[in-house]
C-alpha cells in the first residue's frame, strides 16, 4: 500500500481537502513506513500540500493536532527536507497543547498516583506533565533506581475492543513518539491494576467509567486497592519497566 502511495500521492494530493490530508498524515505517523517504502519526495509533497491548504482555507484544531503528530513523525525520520513550514508547525503545536490541557485526569489515574507515592524508591510523582513534544503524560515518577518514568494509566478506551489487549493506533503513536524522545515510558493497563484489587472485581463498564470520570460518583472508591501492599505496587512498576526495556530492544536496529 505505502509503496503505491509514494507515487500515487504526487498525482492525487491536489484533490485532497484539509480533512483528507490531515487524516493521511496522521495515518502515516501511526503506521510509520520506512523511508525506503514511503520516499522523501512523497512525504515532502504531502508537507507542501498541507501548508498550501492551511494557507488558503485554514485547518481546524483537530486537523492541526494530527499535523503536529505528523511533524513529530517527520522528526523521527530525520529528513529535514520533508519538514513543514515553521508557521504551520507552531500553530499545530499550539493546537495540540491546547487540546491536551482540556483533557481532564481520570479518577483511576489520581488513585494510582496516590498509591505510587507510597512505593519504596519513588521519590516524587507529578500528575499531568507536559513534555517537550507537547504530549501530556499521566504521571511523571522520579524513581531512585530507574530515574524518571513517564507512567501512562491505560484504561479500556486505550485498547481496540472489548477484551482486547491491543492498543489503539492513537495509543501506539503516543507511546512510540514519547519513547523516541528518550523518555522511559511504562504502561499500567487496567487489567494489571484489576489484579491488585482485594475487593471483588469490578466490571469492564465500571472500569471504563473510572478511566473517564473526574468526580467521585463513578469509578473506584478511595479503598479501591485496599489490601494491595507497596511491595505489590513496586513489583507492578518493575514489570512495566522491564516491558519497556523489551520494547526498546525490539526497536533497536
Image: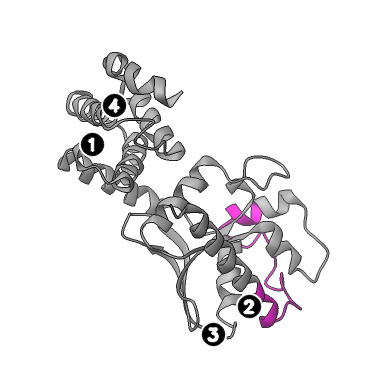
**Front position in the image: 122 or 212:** 122
Residues at marks 2 and 3, CA–CA distance in whole angstroms: 9 Å
Residue at the (31%, 33%) spot, across then down:
60
Mark 1 or mark 2: whose residue is earlier in sequence:
1
Residue at mark 1: 82
Mark 3 or mark 1: whose residue is earlier in sequence:
1
Secondary structure category for the residue under label 2: helix
Mark 2 or mark 4: whose residue is earlier in sequence:
4
Residue at mark 3: 121
Secondary structure category for the residue under label 3: loop
Residue at mark 2: 234
**Circles 2 and 3 in contact, beta carbons < 8 Å:** yes
Residue at mark 4: 42
Residue at the (51%, 47%) spot, across then down:
172
The mark closer to the camera, 1 or 2, is 1
Bounds of the magenta span?
209-235
**Front position in the image: 85 or 157:** 85
The mark closer to the camera, 3 or 4, is 4
Position of residue 50 relative to residue 196, above or below, is above
Give left or right: position of 246 versus 136: right
**Circles 3 and 1 in contact, beta carbons < 8 Å:** no
Crowdedness near tag 3: few (<14), some (14–19) or many (≥20) residues, C-alpha within 10 Å: some
Mark 3 or mark 4: whose residue is earlier in sequence:
4
Amino acid at each position: 500500500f505505502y509503496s503505491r502511495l509514494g507515487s500515487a500521492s504526487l498525482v492525487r494530493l491536489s484533490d485532497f481537502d484539509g480533512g483528507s490530508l490531515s487524516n493521511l498524515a496522521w495515518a502515516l505517523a501511526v503506521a510509520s513506513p520506512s523511508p525506503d517504502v514511503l520516499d522523501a519526495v512523497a512525504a515532502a509533497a504531502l508537507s507542501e500540500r498541507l501548508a498550501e491548504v492551511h494557507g488558503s482555507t485554514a485547518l481546524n484544531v483537530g486537523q492541526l493536532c494530527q499535523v503536529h503528530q505528523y511533524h513529530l513523525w517527520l522528526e523521527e525520520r530525520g529528513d529535514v527536507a520533508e519538514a513543514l513550514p515553521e508557521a504551520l508547525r507552531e500553530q499545530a503545536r499550539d493546537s495540540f497543547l491546547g487540546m491536551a490541557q482540556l483533557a481532564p485526569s481520570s479518577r483511576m489515574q489520581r488513585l494510582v498516583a496516590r498509591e505510587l507515592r507510597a512505593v519504596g524508591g519513588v521519590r516524587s510523582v507529578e500528575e499531568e506533565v507536559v513534555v517537550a513534544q507537547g504530549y501530556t503524560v499521566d504521571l511523571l515518577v522520579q524513581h531512585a533506581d530507574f530515574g524518571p518514568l513517564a507512567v501512562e494509566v491505560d484504561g479500556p478506551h486505550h485498547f481496540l475492543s472489548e477484551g482486547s489487549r491491543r492498543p489503539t493506533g492513537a495509543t501506539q503513536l503516543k507511546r512510540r513518539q514519547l519513547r523516541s524522545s528518550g523518555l522511559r515510558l511504562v504502561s499500567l493497563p487496567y487489567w494489571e491494576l484489576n489484579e491488585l484489587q482485594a475487593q471483588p472485581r469490578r466490571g469492564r463498564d465500571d472500569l471504563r467509567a473510572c478511566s473517564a470520570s473526574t468526580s467521585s460518583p463513578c469509578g473506584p472508591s478511595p479503598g479501591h486497592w485496599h489490601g494491595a501492599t507497596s511491595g505489590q505496587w513496586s513489583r507492578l512498576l518493575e514489570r512495566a519497566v522491564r516491558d519497556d526495556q523489551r520494547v526498546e530492544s525490539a526497536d533497536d536496529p
